[in-house]
Image (cartoon, rainbow, N blue to C red):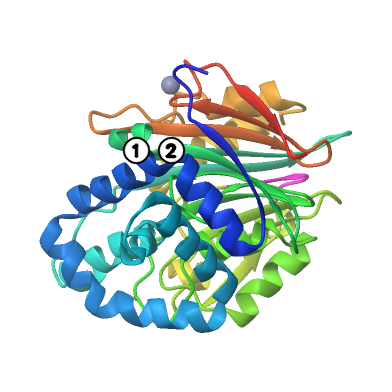
């Protein structure tokens, strides 16, 4: 449909899924790689490889199927595998730039995103606003997969990515960058962790993934499963912590943006009203009225009183989705949720 992100279907073995992805989105995968190089800066993009090649080797050892899929994408898109790996390492490259290249110069952390999970009488809803550079509006895609050996999934990503926030058969996932203090090369990429969570069969199984895999840098993973279990994983280079609605003093919902909420990780009790304006706004709106349907979550995603819906000169909300976990429906808007019309995709 005009003006919306392309949607592709992939199925089969990892290599077959990768090939189908690369062939269908060839021009867009090439554009994503060019955009990443441009936004990070060619010198930094190339310099980061000195550490990222260790990550590459770690992923080959710990996520071989996803590396095969990346190889398939590269072949299908007629690109060097290294550039497709770098697309998948977008978060890690940006984090590397901030924590290794630019250190010790303090750099403002400009990324943003919001995740909302809520259990209603009939459904489990997961809403995610992905807020980023406007250039990514030309690089996005909706990927729906049916692995030969694994659970079906649907996610939004920059073309060429093997995973990102989305909907799996048993749960949905939102994610938000966190200001981790360290960067480590021997970890799994954010895109890979997302994909593994999407294929998990419960929130508990999703959390297990973080017990066996290191993340390279800080990221929050908000998981909502079909049973109505909501968990919030705050992962960083040295480990992870889990928050539940009880920990947050909420009933039936869990919200997250871009600050650590675990007191140990945050370095003390967190006052979200002063440090996380989008979380503060969402909390206030949920306290006034907990959403009971997709429209209710979308209304909070479209909030302008606390800037949940992001409108800035260089960045905006580039994707806004609400997933209905039990019925397997994925409602996505390209760009700001306050202005767009949702397209609905089903898992099967
Ligand atoms: Zn707006």
The quadrant where ligand 1 appears is top left
Q: Residues within 10 Å of mark 2 (few under 14, many from 20)?
A: many
For residue 195, the mark is none
Pinpoint residue 298: horizontal percent, then vertical percent: 61, 25
For residue 136, the mark is 1
At a point 73% along the width and 40% down the height, the residue shown is 118
Q: Is residue 235 visible?
A: yes
Local secondary structure at mark 1: helix
For residue 140, the mark is 2
Cα distance in 3D space between marks 1 and 2:
6 Å
Of the pair 143 and 322, the residue shown nearer to us: 143
Residue 272 within the segment the image draws in magenta: no
Judge left or right: residue 200 versus residue 218: right
Pinpoint residue 149: horizontal percent, then vertical percent: 75, 64
Q: Quadrant of the C terminus?
A: top right
- Which of the 4 image quadrants contains residue 81? bottom left
At a point 61% along the width and 74% down the height, the residue shown is 210
Residue 251 within the segment the image draws in magenta: yes
Judge left or right: residue 329 versus residue 133: right
Of the pair 238 and 76, the residue shown nearer to us: 76
Q: Is residue 164 visible?
A: no
- Which of the 4 image quadrants contains residue 83? bottom left
Judge left or right: residue 51 versus residue 155: left
Residue 147, placed above or below residue 82: above
Q: Which residues are magenta?
A: 249-255
Pinpoint residue 190: horizontal percent, then vertical percent: 48, 63
Q: Are marks 1 and 2 in contact (CB under 8 Å)?
A: yes
Q: Is mark 1 within 8 Å of ligand 1?
A: no
Q: Is mark 2 within 8 Å of ligand 1?
A: no
Pinpoint residue 258: horizontal percent, then vertical percent: 44, 52
Judge left or right: residue 202 versus residue 244: right
Residue 249, placed above or below residue 15: above
């Amino acid at each position: 449909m005009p003006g919306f992100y392309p949607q592709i279907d992939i199925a089969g073995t990892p290599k077959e899924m990768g090939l189908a992805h690369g062939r269908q989105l060839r021009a867009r995968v090439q554009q994503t790689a060019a955009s990443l190089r441009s936004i990070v800066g060619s010198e930094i993009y190339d310099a980061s490889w000195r550490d990222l090649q260790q990550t590459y080797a770690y992923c080959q050892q710990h996520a071989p199927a996803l590396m095969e899929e990346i190889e398939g994408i590269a072949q299908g898109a007629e690109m060097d595998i290294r550039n497709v790996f770098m697309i998948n390492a977008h978060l890690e490259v940006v984090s590397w730039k901030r924590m290794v290249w630019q250190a010790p110069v303090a750099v403002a952390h400009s990324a943003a995103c919001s995740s909302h999970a809520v259990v209603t009488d009939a459904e489990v809803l997961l809403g995610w606003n992905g807020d980023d550079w406007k250039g990514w509006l030309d690089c996005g895609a909706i990927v729906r997969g049916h692995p030969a050996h694994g659970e079906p999934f649907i996610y939004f990503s920059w073309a060429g990515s093997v995973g990102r926030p989305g909907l799996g058969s048993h749960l949905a996932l939102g994610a938000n960058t966190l200001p981790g203090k360290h960067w480590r090369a021997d970890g799994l990429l954010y895109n890979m962790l997302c994909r593994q969570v999407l294929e998990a069969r419960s929130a508990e199984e999703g959390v297990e993934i973080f017990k066996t895999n290191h993340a390279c840098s800080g990221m929050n993973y908000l998981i909502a499963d079909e049973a109505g279990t909501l968990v919030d994983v705050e992962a960083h280079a040295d480990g992870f912590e889990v928050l539940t609605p009880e920990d947050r003093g909420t009933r039936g919902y869990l919200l997250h943006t871009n600050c650590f909420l675990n007191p140990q990780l945050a370095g003390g009790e967190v006052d979200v009203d002063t440090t996380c304006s989008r979380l503060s706004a969402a909390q206030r709106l949920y306290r006034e009225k907990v959403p009971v349907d997709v429209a209710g979550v979308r209304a909070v995603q479209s909030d302008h009183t606390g800037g949940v819906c992001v409108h800035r000169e260089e960045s905006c909300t580039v994707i806004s989705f609400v997933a209905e976990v039990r019925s397997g429906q994925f409602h996505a808007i390209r760009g700001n949720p306050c202005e767009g019309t949702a397209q609905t995709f089903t898992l099967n």
